[in-house]
Image (cartoon, rainbow, N blue to C red):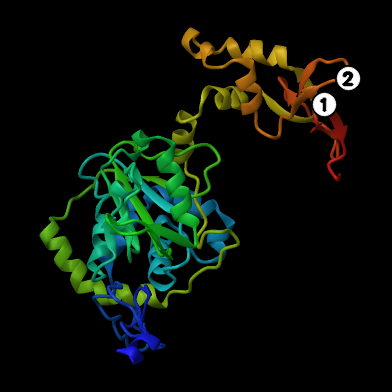
Amino acid sequence: MGNAVTRQWVLVNLPFHAEYPGGRQWNLGAPQFKYKPAVLEDGEKPHHPHWDLILAHCGGDLDDVVREKEWCQRWGLYSGKDYLTAWTACMFREPFEPLPYLFMYGPQNSGKSTFHEVIALLVTSGVVKADRALTNQNDFNGELANAVLGVVDEVNIAKAGPTVYNKIKEWTTSRYISLHPKRVQVYQQRNCLHFVQTANHRNNCPVFPGDTRITMMHVPPFLKEIPKLILYAALEKEAPHFMHTLLNMSLPTSNTRLRLPVLDTISKEDAADTNQGPLEEFLSDECYNVPGEKITMSDFYDAFMATLSMTEKLEWPKRRLRHCLPSMYPAGKSTKGVIFIGNMSFKNKVVPPNTPQYVRRGKYLNLADEVE
């Protein structure tokens, strides 16, 4: 027993690796592949038409964005099907690399949930429901241990407020995740979790302007539905060929913090616009970022108040408004004591390059060169 204490085993989580990877490590409960990749003869190509059908249907909304994105063209991704295939391959082959949060929405029986269901066919474990972990106020999330895919299916997590979006931001890009099973002390684990959310309505996912983590896509109804028994039998038959594609395709490199870039679709832009607060909406619709320009806080406040209802006006005193302005619009006093907002104009003006912009120094607003 004393010898065992000095030569203890270390529990690790290495998805799709052997149970005993060496170095007295125990890869307990890690997900494994169900199917070995097919061995193909020279010149033979993998054949998996039913897998291609599902990926093309779920990723069809991404086709135009993928074709226009230079990064995708450089790495041989020409459609939404290619993007989802690369996303799945990255999750299997580089599970500790972060990937975009996928959100698919569409009418009932459109096949959006089929994407995560068929991924679960390929692995022994590691695909779990993640909606409770995202919305739980006590932060219990033990079900996420050793998971590679967290599924949020037909749950409106946006109702839980900003807390959910903060968790999505952290769990999507963080290198480690804090796990808190019930009646167990919190511990940390290398983060290998990736997310897919499906819903009937677009507003079930908390997407805000400037988001850099979520790829949103609309999934239309099937033109011709295949019975699930027939579909799943065909998918299992083709699984070795699809595994060959996933494990042998050339993975692209990315210059962003995510293994694949986030794609901004029209659906995502519309969803972000609906989630804008009144101040963000006013800044987007009525104001322009013009270096060297300024307007008085009084003029800005009066114009902003004119867009609000009586109830909303009570929620926006001048003090709150001043503190909620983005950093690109510094607010401060002039030498005469008048409060101005710098780099802002109600008119879109063309300014020469290297025009000095306003910065806030203490309580005052001063012009400064951008180089400083």
Can residue 343 be seen? Answer: no
Name the secondary structure under disc 1.
Answer: strand
Q: Quadrant of residue 7?
A: bottom left
- Within 10 Å of disc 2 (Cα), the crowding (few <14, some 14-19, many 20+) is few
Q: Which residue is mark 2?
A: 335
- Residue 353: which disc? none
Q: Residue at x 77, y 20 (%)?
A: 340
Name the secondary structure under disc 2.
Answer: loop
Q: Position of residue 173 (x, y in %)?
A: 49, 56
Q: Residue at x 27, y 56 (%)?
A: 183
- Within 10 Å of disc 1 (Cα), the crowding (few <14, some 14-19, many 20+) is some
What amino acid is found at the position of numbered circle 2 in the picture?
Thr
Badge count: 2
Q: Quadrant of the C terminus?
A: top right
Can residue 367 be seen? Answer: yes
Q: Which residue is mark 1?
A: 364
Task: Say whether disc 1 or disc 2 marks the residue closer to the N-terminus.
Answer: 2
What amino acid is found at the position of numbered circle 1 in the picture?
Tyr
Q: Is residue 342 or residue 53 the one in the foreground? A: 342
Relative side of 94 to 71, left or right = left
Q: Is residue 352 or residue 319 the one in the foreground? A: 319
Q: Residue at x 82, y 26 (%)?
A: 364
Q: Quadrant of the N terminus?
A: bottom left
Q: Residue at x 20, y 50 (%)?
A: 224
Q: Quadrant of residue 228?
A: bottom left
Q: Distance from label 1 to label 2 (Cα)?
A: 7 Å
In the image, residue 24 above or below residue 83: below
In the image, residue 32 above or below residue 327: below
In the image, residue 303 above or below residue 188: above
CB atoms of marks 1 and 2 within 8 Å: yes
Q: Position of residue 258 (x, y in %)?
A: 52, 59
Q: Position of residue 223 (x, y in %)?
A: 23, 47
